[in-house]
Image: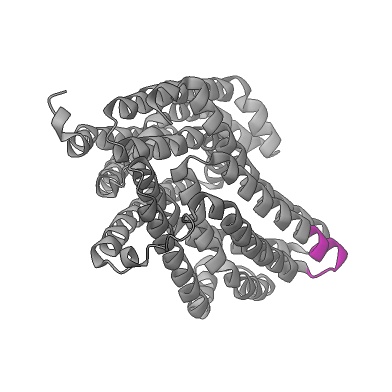
Amino acid sequence: MTTSSLRYRTLIQLAIPVILANIAVPLLGLVDTAVIGHTGDAAALGAIALGALVFSFVYWGFGFLRMGTTGFIARATGARDNDEVRAALTRALLLGLGIGLLLIVLQGLISQLALLLLGGSDDARALLREYIHLRIWGAPATLATFALLGTLIGLGRTRHLLVLQVFLNGLNILLDVYFVLVLDWGVAGVALGTVIAEWSALLLGLWLLWPLVRPAPGQPWPWPLLRQRQRWQATLRTNSHIMWRTLFLLAGFGWFARQGAALGDDVLAANHVLLQFIAFSAFFLDGYAFVVESQVGQAVGARDRQRFRDVIVRSSHLAVGTALLLALLVLLLGHWGVHALTSIDSVREVAIAQLPWVALYVALSCAAFQLDGIFIGTSESRPMRNSTLVALLLFIGASAGLATWGNTGLWLAFVLFVVFRGLTLGACLPGLYRRHFHQDAAD
């Protein structure tokens, strides 16, 4: 794709499949809840909720397999280094499969930690243990699929990404309905349906990706590149930085929940409701961030300074416009959303009072999303780690200083958290440009 083709329309066309794929993901959780909620008891429903939380935490922690792969693939694609594209994909697949197998070996420890930390009734704990020991067998497939998703994004094949995500979640939904509603397998049916869908998605992903990466006839797979220690070290170093960045981000959301819980059950529940609006906005802003990852990485690989600038400027215009529109929707329709998500009057009152802060968060968060996309696409993960840590510490300090303002002070600190993320990472952007386009440092 040449610089001239990077018009706003092109960026939107690349982002829409990502947005649709993101929206497809939470539908699975809704179906899991619905099928158990209409056929099981409270213990079964609690086990599904806790089990989903366990695997969401584990898999989010290994999200570097998607993000790290995208940067390496995008840069190799821009440099037209097809051998490195194949080698980067293979390294990520081997890493994902290896970590997945390790999780299977450690399933007993994972189960014990989950039961210790999450609690629940005896019946729910027994079902949670069963759910974990079944679903863990899908871990290698899920983590390997992260590598495939990262490769598709790095190649700019967002439509393939949409096909894969719709297939994964669609098949999972169908299997859940069949195993639970028809065969009456309960929690075990939900777990087994997920495992089958995860392995099926991996096979489909490999099938979709093979025509894009297969060598020309007579050309071997680049095995020598896989034996180069420095390339493995670069992969592991980049991924470790992203992992720490993710953990710091999780810690920030965890601190927000903890501080809200200290203010009472109504505040805790209301903040949880409001976070759903933020999660919804992330589906859209992530779409542009994913496009930035692939296009910026390819621009760096091709040493195309103009394309690098055009991608950042034009995608940021779209992201800012989208964020402002989403913020306006929160202000205009947020109270309807609150009423749809909870019928508890005291929770509604607390949530509606904080809607302006939620809208402000959404409006300002686009900078953090865009900058994450730039640094992921260029495999510059160390600044991401450092800036997130600094933002986390500033957020904790701000929340302590604003504690006398109650939940309003907490939300103001939370808005500052996303602002701190953008400012600290944005301060690293000139250095990133100099490292990759040093001949234009004077610009």
Q: Where, by quadrant of the figure, is residue 237 drawn?
A: bottom left
Image height check: is 418 above or below 260? above
Image quadrant where one finds the N terminus: top left
Where residue 79 appears, as percent x and y from the top left, is 32, 42
Q: Is residue 366 magenta?
A: no
Where residue 243 appears, as percent x and y from the top left, is 36, 56
Q: Where, by quadrant of the figure, is residue 41 drawn?
A: bottom right
Quick one: which residue is furthest to the front in this view?
Answer: 218
Residue 275 at least partly seen: yes
Using residue 217 as the reference point, say whether residue 404 is left or right of it: left
Using residue 391 as the reference point, say whether residue 11 is left or right of it: right
Where residue 308 appears, as percent x and y from the top left, is 32, 30
The residue that appears at 44% across and 36% down in the rendered structure is: 289
Segment tinted magenta in the rendering: 177-185
Quick one: which residue is furthest to the left in this view?
Answer: 442
In depth, the one of 125 and 288 nearer the eye is 288
The residue that appears at 76% across and 60% down in the rendered structure is: 176
Image quadrant where one finds the C terminus: top left
Residue 276 at least partly seen: no
